[in-house]
Image: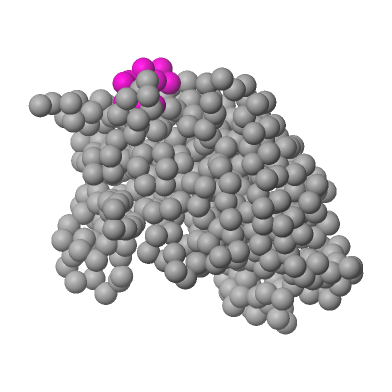
């Protein structure tokens, strides 16, 4: 989700306002009531065309969504064909060929690790469904474990905007206004962030072991038999700026979950479906979750769609119990959305685009590090595949973040969108502790070329240099 204004008594995360104009009385409740966003009138490939004729390079695919770029003719044809077949049918009575086809493709893509797919319309919905499924699983198995009502998540995480998903979220500023409404059965442990979390005296193995012990201690603190699942993002997206887990991290976390009989839920809504160089982000380390949430790159923005993938352990529990999942939504398994996503997934496979993600991801990584790696205010450049984050610091040596009032991420975002540069970035704040710290994300389409990567690297380099030169001026 793109950042919005979040205010507490002590802190404010500013609203992002690139190329905006004072509201002309739109009937739509925009993210900012005082400014209307620019209107997109056309989109093709890597570019968005605005109402004033400007063309902007979409270097982020929106919120890491547009994995094929814009205007793909095959996907448009698939949507039209599905409209001719059936646009909507209620899942209590019916299914459709596109819904069944997408579920089959998704399950086959896990090479037998997952058993079923449950298809919804957004990442937040997927997390809500995952939470309910985890709880129900422990009521279905024999003997039932009704004491399991809790979840353990992580600090500086983001899992969605609905109340259950926001309860799981650890990003403090995003929770602040709604804290009294959030669930009290979710606790949190430290996120895996080698840049800010690993001590100078530690090896990676030491750091992973410390985090595993912290999770173990949390199970003991809340009661091992009360926890449904541990929830984590393989690569933290919006909250931290493309922070991948350290090698061995998820193997250690799954061992703790197994020790106490809890499930492992991986949130791959932003980092999955090819974005990080494997179709499923868990494939990088080979640690399979019990439940996996997916979204964004699933349908590439051509229709709203997300899903959860469920492994055999959980499905078997329901199958031998009541035989049903007590959850349903009006638009679950929507035929048109499924048709769009199914065609996107076919294109990824047929055009070998995941391989291109790996190749172009390496090229983007090396380009960014060569261009801005030595800049005094660039603290860290990290990511995987075509999912890269740049964290900004006031001091490179101490890693001290800028104060929130400096609005670093907001300024860089707005400057990149300026007519002189015409490029999107994805800003984030609270990188250091949930309130202070700044980063931007870059997440171009999977079919991106060397030439477009060169332009992204050159543009962001110029923007960063220009913004910090202005800041340093007396």
Depicted 143 relative to depicted 225: above or below: below
On the image, the x and y values in percent for residue 468 come to: 23, 28
Residue in the picture at 48% in, 25% down? 365
On the image, the x and y values in percent for residue 414 come to: 25, 43
Q: Residue furthest left?
A: 474
Depicted 454 relative to depicted 250: above or below: above
Residue in the picture at 75% in, 44% down? 256
Image quadrant of residue 241?
Answer: top left
Q: Nearer the viewer, residue 192 or 370?
A: 192
The C terminus appears in which quarter of the rendering? top left
As drawn, is 372 to the left or to the right of 337?
left
Q: Nearer the viewer, residue 154 or 361?
A: 154
Q: Residue furthest bottom?
A: 93
Image quadrant of residue 229?
Answer: bottom right
As drawn, is 139 to the left or to the right of 396?
right
On the image, the x and y values in percent for residue 262 come to: 76, 54
As drawn, is 269 to the left or to the right of 97?
left
On the image, the x and y values in percent for residue 196 come to: 48, 32
Residues shaded magenta: 369-379
Q: Nearer the viewer, residue 451 or 214?
A: 214
Depicted 84 relative to depicted 198: above or below: below
Residue in the picture at 74% in, 55% down? 224
């Amino acid at each position: 989700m793109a950042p919005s204004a979040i205010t507490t008594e002590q802190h404010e995360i500013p609203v992002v306002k690139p190329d905006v104009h004072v509201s002309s009385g739109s009937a739509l409740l925009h993210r900012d009531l005082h400014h209307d966003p620019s209107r997109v009138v056309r989109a093709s490939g890597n570019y968005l065309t605005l109402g004033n004729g400007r063309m902007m390079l979409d270097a982020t695919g929106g919120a890491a969504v547009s994995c094929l770029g814009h205007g793909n003719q095959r996907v448009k044809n698939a949507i039209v064909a599905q409209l001719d077949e059936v646009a909507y049918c209620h899942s209590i009575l019916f299914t459709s060929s596109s819904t069944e086809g997408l579920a089959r493709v998704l399950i086959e893509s896990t090479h037998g690790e997952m058993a079923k797919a449950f298809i919804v319309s957004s990442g937040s919905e997927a997390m809500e469904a995952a939470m309910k499924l985890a709880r129900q699983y422990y009521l279905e198995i024999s003997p039932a474990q009704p004491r399991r009502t809790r979840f353990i998540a992580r600090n500086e995480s983001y899992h969605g905007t609905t109340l259950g998903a926001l309860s799981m979220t650890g990003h403090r500023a995003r929770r602040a206004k709604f804290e009294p409404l959030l669930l009290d059965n979710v606790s949190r442990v430290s996120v895996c962030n080698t840049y800010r979390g690993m001590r100078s005296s530690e090896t990676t193995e030491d750091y992973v072991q410390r985090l595993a012990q912290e999770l173990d201690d949390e199970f003991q603190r809340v009661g091992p038999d009360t926890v449904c699942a541990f929830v984590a993002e393989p690569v933290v997206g919006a909250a931290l700026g493309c922070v991948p887990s350290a090698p061995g991290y998820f193997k250690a976390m799954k061992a703790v979950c197994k020790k106490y009989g809890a499930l492992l839920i991986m949130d791959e809504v932003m980092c999955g479906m090819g974005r990080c160089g494997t179709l499923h982000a868990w494939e990088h380390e080979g640690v399979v979750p019990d439940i996996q949430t997916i979204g964004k790159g699933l349908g590439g923005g051509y229709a709203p769609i997300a899903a959860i993938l469920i492994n055999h352990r959980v499905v078997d529990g329901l199958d031998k119990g009541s035989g049903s999942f007590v959850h349903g939504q009006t638009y679950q398994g929507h035929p048109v959305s499924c048709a769009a996503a199914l065609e996107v997934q076919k294109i990824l496979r047929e055009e070998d685009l995941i391989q291109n993600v790996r190749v172009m991801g390496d090229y983007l990584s090396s380009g960014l590090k060569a261009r801005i790696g030595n800049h005094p205010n660039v603290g860290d450049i990290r990511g995987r595949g075509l999912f890269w984050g740049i964290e900004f610091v006031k001091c490179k040596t101490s890693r001290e973040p800028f104060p929130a009032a400096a609005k670093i991420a907001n300024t860089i975002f707005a400057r990149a969108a300026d007519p002189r540069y015409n490029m999107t970035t994805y800003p984030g704040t609270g990188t250091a502790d949930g309130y202070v710290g700044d980063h931007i994300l870059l997440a171009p389409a999977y079919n991106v070329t060397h030439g477009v990567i060169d332009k992204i690297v050159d543009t962001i380099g110029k923007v960063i240099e220009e913004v910090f030169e202005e800041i340093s001026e007396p």
